[in-house]
Amino acid sequence: METTKPLFSSVFISDSLINALKKAVAEKRSPAYTAFEVCRMHADQNLDRTPTVPKQWYVPGYYHDAEGHRKAKNGLRDDANAAYAMALCYRVTGQEKYARSAVRIINAWAMEMETMSRKDDSMLSFSYHFPALIFAADLLRDESAIWPKDQQKVFSEFLRNEALPMNTMSRKNNWGNWGLVLAVSCAVYLKDEVLFGKCAGRWKYFIEHQIAADGHLPHEVNRSGGQRGIWYSHFSLMPQTIAAEILRVNGADLYNFKSPGGRTLKKAYERIAGWTRKPDTFPYWKGDPAELKGMHYFSYFEILNSHWVNDDASKLLAESRPMTATHSAPFLTFTHGITLKKTD
């Protein structure tokens, strides 16, 4: 059900979900327990991590300088995902070592950067890697004994003044979806009702303008002659799904929204799930289906399959769990896989 006034309860992981995860872990219930062990291993490996905050944030374009691109952005990716893993582990286990290490990383990113470029892939990379740090901060914001209020204020100011302007929400392809994740995460964390409303409107825009009548994504399916068409479709639908979940948690449930043109997230999900399971049916690539790129980046199906149980998605998840991702929301089998219904 859609509401006009946001709840502003949690950014991505609600307290009720944390309680359900605690119970699943305590009972060693799959898939949550197995996936939690992966999350906890990642957290343990990063307890002594030294944050890798650059003085100047700049990420060159991937297709012009792939090595430079990865080198420039991977510090944020690894810091944010580690902090998020540790914040999750803290909320599930109560062990303060995880919270203190996560806070150290969060504070470093809020305090140590001097300049932020908006050229080339700088904004896109920030849009899809920084949200995990916001999710981590949100899980820890009530722990003032571990994360003092003055430090939290610095982080909030960084979100408003530095992070939010880096969003790419105005773009029409997958860049826009990732920018939306950053913007709506900031909106909830900062309790900004106006921005939240704009984000909900932009989410609806993407449903109308990115999804064709048969569910394919015209901006994405022909990438690299179709070879990266499934990958880029995932790369658009994953952030659209994450944004939908953030909106839902905060009172704006748009999962069943149908655009004026009859477009829906469900239709896009069903289309991409079928192609992912049976890549030989993907019509936008004329080569060997085995040469398709990015076929396995579907951890976000954990979220969508809890709304619309899909046979293709259920079988893919059952074969691939526990699943994670490197962009914004790792460990999705742990956080969102507990509601998957059993399939044959």
Image: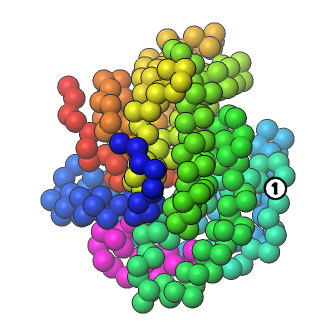
Question: Which quadrant would the N terminus be assigned to in this image?
Answer: top left
Could you tell me which residue is drawn at 80 percent across and 75 percent down?
114
Is 265 magenta? The answer is no
- Location of residue 227 (image quadrant): top right
Per the image, label 1 sits on a secondary structure element best described as loop
Instruction: Report the magenta stretch's main SS.
Output: helix
**Vertical side of 142 occupied by 34: above or below:** above
Residue range highlighted in magenta = 84-108
335 left or right, relative to 216: left
Q: Nearer the viewer, residue 130 or 40?
A: 130
Residue projecting furthest to the front: 4
Residue placed under numbered mark 1 in the picture: 118
**Vertical side of 77 occupied by 208: above or below:** above
Q: Please state the horizontal and vertical placement of residue 190, each as a whole percent of the image.
A: 55, 68
Q: Amino acid at mark 1?
A: Arg
**Vertical side of 293 occupied by 99: above or below:** below
Could you tell me which residue is drawn at 46 percent across and 50 percent down?
4
Question: Which quadrant would the C terminus be assigned to in this image?
Answer: top left
Q: Please state the horizontal and vertical placement of residue 37, each as a whole percent of the image.
A: 32, 59
